Amino acid sequence: MSEVVQTEPAWAGAIRWLARGFALAGAGLLGLLAVLVCASVAGRVLFGRPVPGDFEIVAAGTAVAVFLCLPWCQLSHGNLLVDLFLTRLSVRFAAWLDALSAALLMLLALLFAWRMALGLRDAIRYEDVSIILGFPLWWAYPFAVASFLLLAACCLVTARDSLRSTAQ
């Protein structure tokens, strides 16, 4: 008896690899932000002064880290799942619903990428800066745009995977 080996197209593998890289970068950034918070607390306790602008850095950095992790969350099925509802459905119908939800999330991700790109344009045009450190706020937007575009691609992969599971 021979086994059927299903290979993944190169584009899907590249998307998975990129999403994993984004997630690792997001996790690394969160680790650095944790070190910054610890340094700020230690500075406050030991020297009476926190790291200047620590709240600004942590707020912007956390947003970037979350954006970077969204594509991997989709690929690993880490998003909200109404499992109680899905357990009552046939496997085939649940897979179709999975594919449909991935397609809808893909449309939302593309919408968010477009709107964040417009936000990037406006942040650059109006030269928005943070209050304490005065760093440009636009620098976080490209990460959001790239993450939403990658999320849309990941949704395409998960929809494909779901539809392939119904064919078996």
Image (cartoon, rainbow, N blue to C red):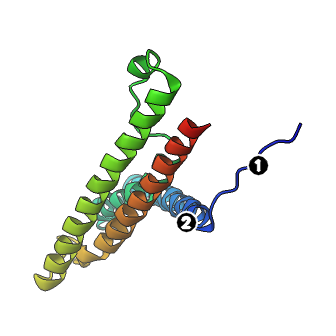
> Which residue position holds label 1?
5
Give the residue at x 22% y 77%. Answer: 134
**Residue 53, quarter of picture:** bottom left
User: Residue 128: which quarter of the image?
Assistant: bottom left
Left or right: 133, with 44 as reference point: left
Whether residue 109 is visible to the viewer of this picture, yes or no, is yes
Q: Foreground residue, 59 or 36?
A: 59
> Label 2 is placed on what type of residue?
Leu
| Element type at mark 2 | helix
List x then y, in percent, for residue 88.
Answer: 44, 15
Pick the quarter of the image with the C terminus.
top right
Q: Position of residue 74 (x, y in %)?
A: 46, 48
Name the kind of residue labelled 1 in the image: Val
Q: Quadrant of the N terminus?
A: top right
Q: Residue sitting at 24 percent across and 60 percent down?
A: 112
Q: Residue furthest left?
A: 126
Question: On the picture, is 4 further left or further right than 85?
Answer: right
Between marks 1 and 2, how big is the CA–CA gap?
24 Å
Crowding at dot 1, Cα within 10 Å, few <14 / some 14-19 / many 20+, comes out as: few
Please state which of the two labelled residues, at mark 1 or mark 2, is closer to the viewer: 1
Task: Check contact, mark 1 vs mark 2: CB within 8 A.
Answer: no
Residues 88 and 32: in front is 88
- Badge 2 is on which residue? 18
